[in-house]
């Protein structure tokens, strides 16, 4: 391991900083291989610190120290001590303000980990969250140290004509030798993780936004010249997000300038640096012919997410990294609400829950399970997880459900008012919700400290004589690493009732006025609720809108599911019924495959689908979700021992059988909705494309001449990327004579568009067609593959290991060895991304013995690799533990 003794950091050890940094004055003399940083820090001993320590220890990594001055006097070597990770000043002043000047140099080009200052194509940019600022200069790199930053950038005028940092541009000038400089000042105190700088040859797209109080904000998106035609959607999304946050949360933007820069090399999606967001190009650039409808939606979602951070994250930030969900869970909830309001609420909720259940539930049930507020970590970058983000958002959503929209808004207002300019905790957030609403949320707080997905058993007992329905709920949270015997949680369970004709039956509970739906607040391990005045036994629609991140354990017959699929007025539960119905049909077929029985399709699903296909639908995106079979990953989560091959075979069998039986319907729907149109990003056009492409995928399983020419015609005539990708995917995942030719044609057409070529890699890497593994190995040697580019790595190695269960889990272990080889190679360049790739192996306990052994062996091989990073070490060793 690179660090022989990786240190674990504990939440319980938190103490306030010993020093505060009020002002930071930074000067960068920029060069790709040699950048000199001069930092003038105005410090003071923190009056709140009880520590007797008289030394000042700053964090710093990979820095070349050139000199230190204290209040204008150079310190000599005995007055400070340097280690690989720190700089300690002996006898730092204990009273009053003092100024420390530190000069150091760094090499951005050698920085392939993309943390700190690094090079992406011809530009220089930064990524500081969580702990990247210490790779720029020595600092108190912790979020509860908040400072006002002034930054001056000096660089060659031709190489770096654009020089950006946080806040407002205050001055600029020319220097000898074709150099220039620009100074920036950010009036808001911030933690250093929100610092950013960008230098490069960039084009700027400009617009403006007038805030609710009438202030005019300049909006700027910076991209490389060849991408200026792909920024309109991002700009519109930004304006939509700004308006939405005013209307829904009453939050206004605070600086006069909002900048977004798109960079091609980025470890994640985007970063909310104050006034200067830095984005992965994937979440900015879109043109109808280069980006799919989903890309358009994701761009709007991520632009919104980073914008919303300006309040939930920047104005009010985290006290320490254990509180990460304070800003991330809340901001994900906000971006989910935003996207739901912009398009279809029903579709957005289903997509979010689908992802949560397929991926976060697996994380919560595996060796890496942790609460949304973790208690210990080795490498904080490993804790930007589905749990902190997605489950964190569900926890905030439950507060919204329990307090109601208005109560939740009151809580948010109080939170922002009380803590503006502070670094606070998850507890502070819940306290604001309590105080604004006069509610006691003591028990609710357990959601922050308890890991694992709770299971809910529900039972109902109807008494015809009294007309009473008794609902009994039992909750249980399984053991997770380090946590057993968990006390009950406060769970909001939203329900509705349907009578035998499928109509709404009113709920009468505890003498309250009858309502169409209600939230049962489950707080005990077991609790009953009595509903009265029911002339017949109703059907209960449980956990409407997925009101809590739990697993409901109950048996429903296929007939009951078909009934709910036809009549449930809750759009989420109606979809849920479709998933459970198809899931049960597939589960029976899996058992047939495992026992060598012949496969026949249960007619219940054909009937249910026929009914759906015969109805008229307004929201075609929602309709296409009702027709989509559950993902293989979701089906896997339902099995005790995951049988990837049987899951795949059973699901394909259902898909093909449905296509055979319902061919005429699918073809009609396809024809009704197919247009050779350039992409129009509105709900109607997106819905048409979704339903049409869903039909195309069913039809392509038939592998008839007709179905093959249908996909080929769509591929050749496609004037938007959604249609082009959908048809190419149908072709690649079937026995199509034009497969190779289409792949080559696509590559030739798009070879200059990196994001489209990423799709080309990902589509081939996730294909279930035989021969995919050999193809993936070939693609690794392709001239367009680049291990140094995280998007490319994710599109090949990530797609193969995380979105291709049949081939990744090949019985001979070839997929596992392949992944281990790539992780080990990538770790030398980019530990953060390498560590993410390891998570494909984390669920090893869920597979059969043979696969378990193979997966364990490669995890061990990764751990035993010389000089493996602490990032990868933590993920791999905790996976094995
Ligand atoms: N806050 C960043 C994530 C930083 C990840 C550091 N490893 C993006 C976001 O969640 O908005
Ligand atoms: Zn975020």
Image (cartoon, rainbow, N blue to C red):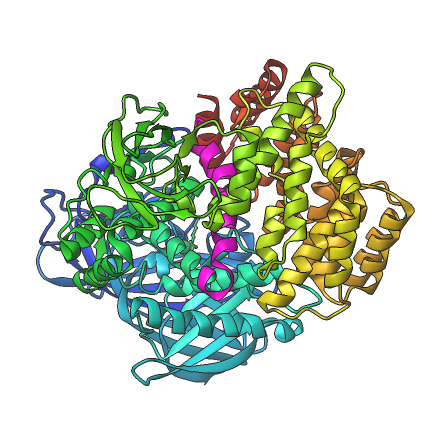
**760 in relation to 483, above or below:** below
**763 in relation to 212, above or below:** above
Q: Quadrant of residue 218?
A: bottom left
| Left or right for 860, reference 135 | right
Is residue 647 something one can see in this rendering? yes
Quadrant (top left/top right/bottom left/bottom right) for the C terminus: top left
Where does ligand 2 appear, by image quarter? Answer: bottom left
Residue in view at x 29 percent, y 82 percent: 213
Magenta highlight on residue 361: yes
Q: Quadrant of residue 366?
A: top left
The one of 23 and 229 positioned closer to us in this rendering:
229
Classified by dominant secondary structure, the portion drawn in magenta counts as helix
Query: Where does the image place residue 734, in percent across and percent down from the top left?
Result: 81, 41
Query: Where does the image place residue 345, in percent across and percent down from the top left?
Result: 47, 58
Stretch of the chain drawn in magenta? 340-368
The one of 433 and 745 positioned closer to us in this rendering:
433
The one of 660 and 87 positioned closer to us in this rendering:
660
């Amino acid at each position: 391991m690179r660090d022989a003794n990786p240190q674990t950091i504990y939440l319980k050890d938190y103490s306030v900083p010993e020093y505060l940094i009020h002002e930071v004055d930074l000067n960068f003399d920029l060069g790709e291989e040699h950048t000199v940083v001069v930092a003038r820090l105005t410090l003071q001993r923190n009056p709140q610190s009880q520590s007797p320590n008289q030394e000042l220890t700053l964090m710093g990594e990979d820095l070349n120290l050139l000199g230190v001055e204290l209040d204008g006097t150079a310190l000599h070597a005995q007055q400070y001590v340097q280690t690989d990770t720190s700089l300690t000043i002996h006898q730092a002043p204990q009273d009053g303000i003092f100024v420390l000047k530190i000069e150091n140099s760094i090499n951005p080009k050698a920085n392939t980990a993309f943390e700190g200052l690094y090079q992406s194509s011809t530009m220089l940019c930064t990524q500081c969250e969580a702990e990247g600022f210490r790779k720029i200069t020595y600092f108190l790199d912790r979020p509860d140290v908040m400072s006002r930053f002034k930054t001056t950038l000096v660089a060659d005028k031709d190489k770096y004509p654009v020089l950006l940092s946080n806040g407002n541009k205050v001055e600029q000038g020319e220097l000898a030798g074709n150099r220039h400089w620009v100074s920036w000042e950010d009036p808001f105190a911030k933690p250093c993780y929100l610092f950013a700088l960008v230098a490069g040859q960039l084009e700027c797209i400009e617009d403006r936004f007038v805030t609710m109080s009438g202030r005019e904000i300049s909006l700027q998106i910076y991209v490389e010249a060849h991408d200026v035609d792909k920024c309109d959607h991002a700009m519109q999304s930004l304006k939509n997000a700004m308006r939405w946050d005013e209307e829904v949360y009453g939050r206004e933007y605070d600086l006069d300038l909002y900048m977004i820069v798109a960079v091609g090399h980025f470890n994640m999606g985007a970063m909310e640096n104050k006034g200067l967001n830095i984005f992965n190009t994937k979440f900015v650039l879109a043109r109808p012919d280069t980006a799919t409808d989903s890309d358009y939606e994701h761009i709007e979602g991520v632009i919104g997410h980073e914008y919303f951070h300006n309040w939930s994250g920047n104005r009010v930030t985290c006290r320490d990294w254990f509180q990460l969900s304070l800003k991330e869970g809340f901001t994900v909830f906000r971006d989910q609400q935003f996207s739901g309001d912009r398009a279809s609420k029903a579709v957005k909720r289903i997509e979010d829950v689908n992802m949560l259940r397929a991926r976060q539930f697996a994380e919560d049930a595996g060796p890496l399970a942790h609460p949304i507020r973790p208690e210990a970590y080795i490498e904080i970058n490993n804790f930007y997880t589905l749990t902190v983000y997605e489950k964190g958002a569900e926890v905030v959503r439950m507060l919204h459900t329990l307090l109601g929209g208005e109560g939740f808004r009151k809580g948010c207002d109080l939170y922002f008012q009380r803590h503006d300019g502070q670094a606070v905790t998850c507890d502070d957030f819940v306290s604001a919700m309590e105080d604004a609403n006069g509610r006691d949320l003591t028990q609710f707080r357990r959601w922050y400290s308890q890991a694992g997905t709770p299971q809910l058993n529900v039972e109902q007992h109807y008494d015809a004589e009294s007309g009473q329905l008794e609902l009994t709920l039992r909750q249980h949270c399984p053991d997770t690493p380090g946590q057993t015997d968990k006390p009950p949680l406060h769970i909001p369970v939203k329900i509705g009732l349907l009578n035998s004709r499928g109509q709404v039956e009113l709920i009468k509970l505890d003498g309250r006025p009858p309502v169409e739906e209600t939230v049962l607040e489950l707080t005990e391990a077991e609790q009953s609720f009595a509903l009265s005045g029911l002339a017949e036994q109703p059907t209960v629609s449980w956990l409407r809108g997925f009101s809590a991140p739990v697993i409901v354990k109950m048996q429903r017959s296929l007939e009951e599911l078909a009934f709910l699929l036809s009549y449930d007025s809750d759009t989420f539960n109606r979809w849920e019924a479709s998933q459970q119905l198809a899931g049960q049909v597939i589960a029976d077929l899996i058992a047939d495959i495992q026992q060598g029985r012949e496969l026949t399709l249960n007619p219940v699903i054909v009937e249910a689908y026929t009914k759906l296909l015969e109805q008229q639908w307004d929201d075609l995106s929602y309709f296409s979700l009702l027709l989509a079979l559950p993902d293989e990953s979701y089906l896997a989560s339902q099995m005790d021992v995951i049988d990837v091959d049987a899951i795949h075979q059973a699901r394909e069998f259902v898909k093909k059988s449905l296509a055979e039986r319902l061919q005429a319907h699918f073809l009609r729907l396809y024809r009704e909705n197919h247009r050779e149109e350039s992409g129009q990003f509105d709900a109607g056009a997106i819905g048409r494309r979704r339903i049409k492409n869903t039909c195309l995928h069913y039809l392509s399983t038939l592998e008839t001449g007709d179905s093959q020419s249908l996909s080929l015609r769509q591929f050749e005539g496609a004037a938007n990327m959604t249609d082009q990708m959908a048809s190419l995917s149908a072709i690649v995942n079937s026995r199509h004579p034009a497969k190779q030719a289409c792949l080559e044609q696509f590559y030739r057409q798009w070879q200059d568009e990196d994001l489209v070529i990423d799709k080309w890699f990902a589509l081939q890497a996730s294909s279930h067609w035989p021969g995919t593994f050999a193809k993936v190995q070939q693609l690794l040697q392709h001239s367009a593959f680049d291990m140094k580019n995280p998007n490319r790595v994710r599109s090949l190695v990530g797609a193969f290991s995380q979105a291709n269960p049949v081939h990744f889990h090949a019985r001979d272990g070839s997929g596992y060895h392949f992944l281990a080889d790539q992780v080990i190679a990538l770790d030398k360049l980019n530990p953060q991304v390498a560590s993410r790739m390891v998570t494909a192996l984390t669920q090893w306990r869920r597979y059969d013995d043979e696969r378990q052994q193979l997966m364990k062996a490669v995890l061990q091989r990764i751990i035993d690799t010389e000089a493996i990073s602490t990032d990868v070490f933590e993920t791999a060793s905790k996976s094995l533990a």
